[in-house]
Image (spheres, rainbow, N blue to C red):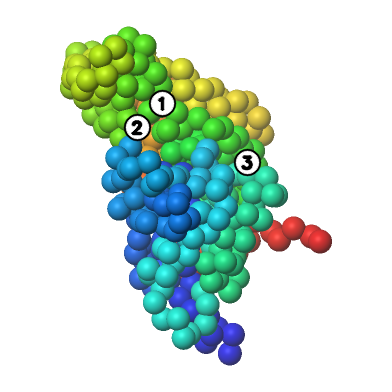
Amino acid sequence: MRSFFGFLGRDMAVDLGTANTLVYVRDRGIVLDEPSVVAVNTRTGKIVAVGAEAKQMIGRTPGHIVAIRPLADGVITELDVAEQMLRYFIKKVHRRHALSQPRLVIAVPSGITDVEQRAVKEAGYQAGARRVYIMEEPMAAAIGAGLPVNEPCGSMVVDIGGGTTEVAVISLGGIVTSRSIRVAGDELDQAIISHVKKEHSLALGTRTAEEVKMAIGTACPPTEGRTFPVRGRDLVTGLPRTVEITDQEVYEAINEPVSAIVDAVQATLDQCPPELAGDLIGAGIMLTGGGALLDGLDRRLAQATGMPIKIADNPLLSVVLGTGRCVEDFDRLQGVLVPEPRH
C-alpha cells in the first residue's frame, strides 16, 4: 500500500547548487534547471522573480529590488529566501496538489554542518515534501558520472561547482576520505574581476567575468594568445569602456584558486588508504561540475597527480542525475543517503 502512495506524490531529487538549482522527477528525468537567484522587493518583502528571470536582473535593478543568491559557498545563507525559492521550483514541476506530497532527496556539500543540514531539510519540508533525505554531493556526482560506488574498489570524484569543490574517495557505498573547500567557479569569477579592476581600472559584473572564464579561461599556461573584449565601468571617469584582455592575463588571475583545487585533490590522495590508492591508479579521477569544463584543468591535475583524469559525460548534470538515480532506485541506493541524526 505504501508503494502505491509513493507513486502518487512523484518523488523528486534536487541539486541545490550555489549557481543553479536542478530538479529531477521520478519517471520523468530532469524537469528544471534554473539559476539559484531570487529578486526581492525590499519595500514590500515580496518576491518579484525567481530563477532565470531573476538572474537577468542582477546588476540591473532599481534600488528597492535586490537580486539575492540564497546560497553562498554551497550553504544556505538566506534561509527564508531559499525556502521560497525551493517551494517555487517544486510547485513549478509538481502541480498535482490534491495528491500526496513527494519524497525529496536533496544533494548538499560534504562539509555541511548539522545546523546547515537542518536548514536544508526545513526548506524541503516548508516547500511541501513528505520526507526529506540528504545526500552528499560527491556521492551523487559519482553515481551520476557512472562510477561503481557500491563495489569494493576505490573511485575518486572531484566535483567543482559554483561555491564549493568536493573531492572524495568512495568505496562500498560510502565516502572513505573527502575534502570540501569553498573555492570553485565563483572564486574564479571574483579573481578575474579583481585582476581587471587592478590592471585596467575597470569594474566588471559577475556575468561578464563568467563569460571571460568560459571563453578564454585556462588552468595551464596558454600558447595561443587569445583575447576577449570586456565591457565595464571605468573607475576613473565613471563611463563605460571596453578593453581586450588576454588568455595569459586570465591564466595568471585564476591561477591561485586553481592551485587551491589541485592542492585539495593532492591532500585527499595523501589520506587515501594504500589499497584504494592502488585502485585509483587504474581507474583514475573523475571530474564533474561546471568547473570540470575549465580548459586545461584535466591536464593540470594529471601533471600534479600522475593519474589519468576523466571528465564526466554531463559534468553539469552529474549531481542531479546521481540524486535522480537514488529516487528511481530508492530501495537499492538508500544506503548512500546521509543517516538521520539520532536524537
In front of the other: 297 or 122: 122
Residue type of the residue flagged with mark 2: Thr
Residue 306 visible within the image = no
In the rendered image, which quarter is residue 237 located in? Answer: top left
**Residue that numbered label 1 is attached to:** 190
Q: Residue furthest front?
A: 43
Q: Is residue 125 left or right of residue 184?
A: right
Residue 331 against residue 178 in the figure, above or below: below
**Residue that numbered label 3 is attached to:** 111
Residue 196 against residue 109 in the figure, above or below: above
Q: Position of residue 113 (x, y in %)?
A: 67, 45
Total count of labels: 3
- The Cα atoms of the two marked residues, 1 and 3, are separated by 22 Å
In front of the other: 277 or 21: 21
Q: Are marks 1 and 2 in contact (CB under 8 Å)?
A: yes
- Label 3, secondary structure: give it: loop
The residue drawn where x is 38% and y is 47% is 65
Few, some or many C-alpha atoms within 10 Å of disc 2 (few <14, some 14-19, many ≥20)? Answer: some
Residue 30 visible within the image = yes
- Label 1, secondary structure: give it: helix
Q: Nearer the viewer, mark 1 or mark 3?
A: 1
The residue drawn where x is 48% and y is 72% is 11
Residue type of the residue flagged with mark 1: Gln
**Residue that numbered label 2 is attached to:** 206
